[in-house]
Amino acid sequence: MCGNSCGIQVMVEDDHIVKVRPDKRSPFSRGYVCNKAQAVGSYQHHNQRVLSPLKRGADGSFEAIDWDAATGEIGKKLRKILDEHGGRSIALIGGGGQANHLDFPYAVSFLRALGSRYHYNALGQEYTQKYWINGHMFGSEGLDFHADENRCDVLLIIGTNPWISHGMQRARLVVREISNDPNRKLIVVDPRRHETAKKADVYLRIRPGTDIYFFLALINVIVKERLCDEDYVAKHTTDWDEVKWVADLVTPEKAAPLCDLEAEQIRDVARTFAKAKRAATHIDLGIYHNIYMMENVYLERILLAITGNIGVPGGVVFPEGFVSAVLPEGREETWKTRIAGIPQIRGFFPPSALPEEILAPGEDRIRAVIVEGSNPLRSYADSKKFEEAFKALDLLVVIEPAMTEAARLAHYVLPAKTGYEKFEASLFPKGFPEIYFHLRHPVCKGPELAKQECEIFSMILQKAGVDVSGLLPFSLLKQAQASDEPPVLSLVRGACMFFAAKHRDALKQNGIITGEGDAASELFQAILDHPEAVHLCDTLDDNNLDCLKTADGKIHLAVPMVLEMLKELAIPEEVDTTDHEDFPFVLQTGERTNYTANTIQR
């Protein structure tokens, strides 16, 4: 239910999960779990499971129909919409849950086969600012880093509480290890002295919404006191001379009253971070969903770059995944939403923009929506507007294990297997320099008529008369169906071919393959033989920046639009702290509870 996907062991009786415990054999979580894992039985077993394909009648009630009839009717209606209005009239929302990612390549390929790029996903409004910045600085919106928490000397945490949100692998153990090590330093900056802050060596209670002045003041100290890593900047970055002026915007003395901090506190943090052999940052939704979010994400990367901490051990690193090689390649063009003109970022659109794309009049409005692995009426803002929009569609299909609020509005509801009833995996990288892959085996049978998402997408496209021969995920699926292999294993088998070709020597060195037979087959068998996950191999510490996608292989520090925003930044003399009689509270949303399951929540 979360991106970490810690290894667990489950006890199953009569096809029910009755007990959950951490899997100490897991090479990446090593016996660590949080309370989310303990609750998986409740998400698996409930009275809202969809047991068969359903069709909604004119009176709003649902009747069970067979798969052939359901996919046939859906395919016929999709074909009519395609013929009359084209692919731009079709959208998909969801596509892959937090730990159930093996349907994602099929969801994307399904949408492409229909001639659409309108993919609405939580990532389209959760992390878009950092994806956009990554695209300009690193050459790819999908190239993201995380802190090398296990090897950093200094960890600066801003806008997140990993002790509760578990936003990193083995979060509480990592926080405790850094806090207890006299040679390492944990710095937490947050308006609230939360659980992680209580473990910090240095805690700064910053005023909400003033992070931009804090970042600018850190950069000011580092530049003015000549603490930059000049060799790193010269070798691995471009355009520093065009960017350096941002260091003049805010001094610690200027930032201190705005941030409700002491100037010397800011100086101490800047010096500690810059002088550390290796330092890393860990920021999350407290920054990403705050004012000046674009500027803050950019300034964090400038801070890391000028101190030589991007793509190095103990800094922030670009981890390598396993299945990315078989994901669909880049888009032919960047689409935009029809009404607000919002461009795709990392291939996604923000779900909150979908209702107006459906409701606003026009020949090219969205007329058909496929909901898969998502519950928009529960997960996204303005449920009433979503309800109004969904009722206005010509076709709404929900592919789901549960009869959700969105499913109750659908024309068709198609029962999907849960992640405990099929082979599944999380595609998020789980370490550095280690590369892990965890292929979870099915532990429950589930409803007899439930199918995997890849099969459902394939059936609908076939009934719509859409050619999928040029799409790799569906080609692999066809091979699996011909050999009677569990469907998504074909995707894993295909990924093994790419991965083994790239990492043959490292796999051999780690004992995963012999180097004498078919490397891909040996790798596939090793993955199957280790349901607790397998440590495939390690990447090399000294070549992490080789993954940059910029033409010159360097970090591009100048992002013109953000620099213009910083030039126009109105820096106040003081912050108005007067309570507003109509708005007496400051509301900060994000990963703040033990029970957040994001769009997996039902």
Image: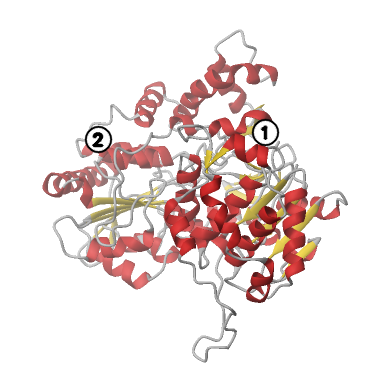
Compared across the picture, whether 135 is left or right of 42 comes to left
From the image, tell me which residue sits under label 2: 462
Residue that extends furthest to the left in the rendered view of this protein: 84
Query: Would you identify the image quadrant in which residue 9 lies?
Result: top right
From the image, tell me which residue sits under label 1: 433
Q: Position of residue 560 (x, y in %)?
A: 43, 52
Q: Position of residue 453 (x, y in %)?
A: 39, 42
Q: Of discs 2 and 1, which sits in the foreground?
A: 1
Compared across the picture, whether 499 is left or right of 282 comes to left
Type of amino acid under label 2:
Gln
The local secondary structure at tag 1 comes to loop
Type of amino acid under label 1:
Pro
The answer to whether any part of residue 319 appears in the image is no
The answer to whether any part of residue 114 appears in the image is yes
Q: Position of residue 421 (x, y in %)?
A: 51, 42
Residue at the (33%, 39%) spot, across then down: 331
Camera-nearest residue between 44 and 583: 583
Q: Residues within 10 Å of mark 2 (few under 14, many from 20)?
A: some
Residue at the (82%, 50%) spot, across then down: 184
The local secondary structure at tag 2 comes to helix
